[in-house]
Amino acid sequence: MSLKEKIVFITGASSGIGAATALAFAAEGTRLLLAARRADKLAQVASLAAGCGAAAIHSIDLDVRDHRAVQSAIDTLPPEWAPIDVLVNNAGLSRGLDKLYAGKIEDWDEMIDTNIKGMLYVARAVVPGMVTRGRGHVVNMGSTAGEITYPNGAVYCATKAAERAINDGLRQDLLGTPVRVTSIDPGMVETDFSLVRFHGDAERAAKVYKGVTPLTPEDVAEAIVWAVSRPLHVNIARVVLTSVDQANSLLFNRKS
Ligand code: NDP
Ligand code: 8X3
């Protein structure tokens, strides 16, 4: 299916998987609606996307945890940007790697508010328009962490288990409409994810990727574009992808 001129809305487009997804969709000639909180980073991604062939770009400074801001951002889109064809519900983060009984409440709140509630707010604001227009595709960002919980990561893993339930529930609730719903579930991807998890501790973040070859953000972006470009009667429910050095969220082939 050609994606040319389709409107693709990507949350968390300022970095990592979201940024790579923006560039991959840009190469398909789509129109890109990019959202994140860091406007400077978003502007850099927008400029790269323009160079990759995006048909048009519109950026929104948005915190997905603020449900009024999310609804207002969608309600006040310029008319030419309103008919969103594809939503990549990607904004998310991990905070901390602690035993559950020693975890920081503010870390839990941030993960739950962003990964679960933020994802829901964006879907709630965007999906009704897709139903009314009789077309659309929602791509939610899951993780292997949502399938098997790993030690010290219970709350992050729980947010991705919730994503799994919400993704499946949304697909059931959209049965009878042409709107498609896909979860993309990567294992370890080298992005700013670990830097954010460890509150900016770059040395600790680098250790996460030591001795393994992780996925790249571009690997994940390619899977997203693939799922979205299937013929319109095909719904890819879930794509699970890891590097060959990872079997699941617990098992790695670490060389050092
Ligand atoms: P990055 O840290 O590189 O990117 C995270 C993105 O989310 C940034 O663009 C950030 O933008 C945005 N974001 C975070 N909080 C908010 C918020 N409150 N409102 C709006 N945007 C927000 O990490 P990744 O690219 O790795 O993460 C993207 C998604 O992929 C997440 O959902 C993550 O859970 C998931 N994932 C990551 C894996 C990995 O190993 N890296 C594996 C599996 C899934 P800004 O700060 O500018 O707002
Ligand atoms: C990110 C992958 O295993 O680092 O969802 O939690 S993991």
Image (cartoon, helix red, strand yellow):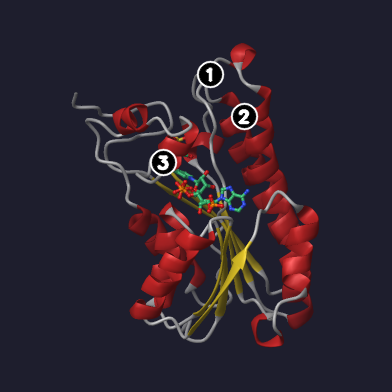
Could you say which is closer to the camera, residue 93 or residue 40? 40
- Name the outermost residue toward the front: 40
Residue 51 position within the rendered picture, expressed as x and y whole percent measured from the top left: 34, 79
Circle 2 — which element? helix
Q: Nearer the viewer, residue 54 or 37?
A: 37
Q: Would you name the residue on which mark 3 appears?
A: 187
CA distance for labels 1 and 3: 20 Å
Q: Does residue 141 sit above or below 137 in this rendering?
A: above
Rendered position, 203 above or below 20: above
Determine which residue is flagged by label 2: 107
Under 8 Å from ligand 2: the CB of mark 3? yes
Task: Report, in whole angstroms, how far the alpha carbon at label 3 lies from the one at label 2.
Answer: 21 Å
Kind of residue at badge 1: Asp
Q: Quadrant of residue 104?
A: top right
Which of the two labelled residues, at mark 1 and mark 3, occupies the earlier sequence position?
A: 1
Q: Left or right: where does residue 195 sit relative to residue 183?
A: left
Which SS class for mark 3?
loop
